[in-house]
Image (spheres, rainbow, N blue to C red):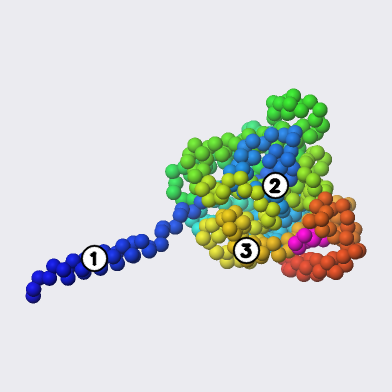
Amino acid sequence: MKYRPFSFLLTGLIFAVIGTFFISHTPPLAAPKPNIVFIFADDLGWGDLSSYGATDLKTPHIDSLLQSGLRFTNFYANSPVCSPSRAALLSGRWPEAMGVPGVIRDDLADSWGYLAPGLLLPNYLQKAGYHTALVGKWHLGLEPENAPNERGFQEFYGFLGDMMDDYYTKRRNGHNFMRHNRQVIDPPGHATEVFTEGAIRYVNSRKNNPKPFFLYLAYNAPHNPLQPPADWLDRVKKREPTIDPTRAKLVALIEHLDANIGRLLATLKANRQLENTLIVFTSDNGGWGPAKANNGPYRAFKGTMYEGGIRIPAGIAWTGHIQPGRVSDERGQLSDWMPTFLELAGQQATMPVDGKSLVPVFLTNQPDAQKLDLLRQRPLFYIRREGNDAFKGLTTQAVRLGDWKLLQPSPFLPFELYNLKDDPKETTDLSKQEKAKANELTRLLMNHIQLGGAVPWQKRK
């Protein structure tokens, strides 16, 4: 056979071109899954951050975090009280669908929920390759089967119960609910500092581990008792000499919380973990009235279905992925965070999920209009079951659809209807004038109540 240099050259060029084509068209390797840090304040009012308009307190670390990403102005809890909001957050479901329509307490005669079986956010994230940790407040059950380690958290360092009677002794009704995993512990110090140190130890332990982590950092602050460290209170009183004494304690407790969050952020930065860590900061419900909380321009406080009870500060930051300085008035709810995190982790839920992913809101400047419409057009529901004379074991409910909101201020009072676009302070009840709209929202709420009734909220014996 004759040697044909041109044909060999041509063949080589063809293979080179083909090789270049396949190399250039090979899909890029998937980016590493982000670490997720979810920071949850307890009873922090919508207006109790300087980034949300407070003028008598300073929260530079939280403000800086929110400024580094996207801050929501129209974000909601799923309930005006604690346990239902936490159940919604960790399940992506309406609280009553998880058997938690009210506050879970150590006093069974005054406990209004039992966390239903099923997979929670940390279970799903484990399947996606994450290590999962809870530092801080649990408040979703004291039963062995509902302890954090049994519900998906590989590491738990915190408080099983509801509120603490004292931030230093960390007891509730004489009981010690502090645990490291399943072991009873009694760490000294202020609870905010104890939880911060636990979170710092955890992120340091993950420093050289390529596996992504999920840290759920749930503080007790600024829930009552209003018990800031003395030097923090003195600082507030000197800076704000005319401040109400009760308000001064709350401000000091919030500023102390802010400083501790700053410690955690500094650790993540020093460890170079911040570069691939998504961080959310928010609250479980509105601020508490007797604490002189600031819920911004909104009506009422924690425990009520008015905006002051359920609208919460919220923001998300992720270096290199979310443009800094963004502000969004898109409506979201705590139950939306689970599907959001699962989408980012590439994990599919195998159980029903009521929340919607917020990824279209924050990951692009040109979001998918169809997905945003689904967020805007869906109804948002809220629930609270409670005892005492004000409730007698019954519930209050609310539903928001677009600009309209139907709410019940008490189980023994008629429903009220407000247009939040025209009347964000909920001053004018339109239930008599807008009967068709009231009926539409009533039907939505009735259907929702029927679905929730299928799930027991007390432990079956």
Q: Secondary structure at mark 2?
A: strand
Foreground pick, 55 / 408: 55
Disc 2 marks which amino acid?
Pro
- Name the spot of residue 197 as percent of width and height, x first: 58, 37
Disc 3 marks which amino acid?
Ala
Camera-near label (2 vs 3) is: 3
Does the magenta segment cover residue 69?
no
**Where residue 13 is drawn, which disc sits there?**
1
Foreground pick, 330 / 231: 330
Query: For residue 459, which quarter of the picture?
Result: bottom right
> Does the CB distance between marks 2 and 1 fall below 8 Å?
no
Camera-near label (2 vs 1) is: 1
Q: Residue at x 82, y 61 (%)?
A: 406
> Does the CB distance between marks 2 and 3 fall below 8 Å?
no
Q: Secondary structure at mark 1?
A: helix
Q: Residues within 10 Å of mark 1 (few under 14, many from 20)?
A: few
Q: Is residue 454 above or below residue 336?
A: below
Q: Is residue 296 above or below residue 130?
A: above
- Residue highlighted by disc 3: 369
Query: For residue 89, which quarter of the picture?
Result: bottom right
N-terminal label among 1 and 3:
1
Q: Is residue 448 above or below residue 187?
A: below
Does the magenta segment cover residue 399?
yes
**Where residue 313 is drawn, which disc sits there?**
2
Query: Gap between marks 2 and 1, in whole Å?
Result: 61 Å
Disc 1 marks which amino acid?
Leu
- Relative to residue 190, is residue 344 drawn left or right? left
Instruction: Give the magenta part as a residue range.
Output: 398-406
Which secondary structure class fits the magenta region best?
A: strand
- Name the spot of residue 327 as percent of width and height, x first: 65, 49
Q: Residue furthest bottom?
A: 1
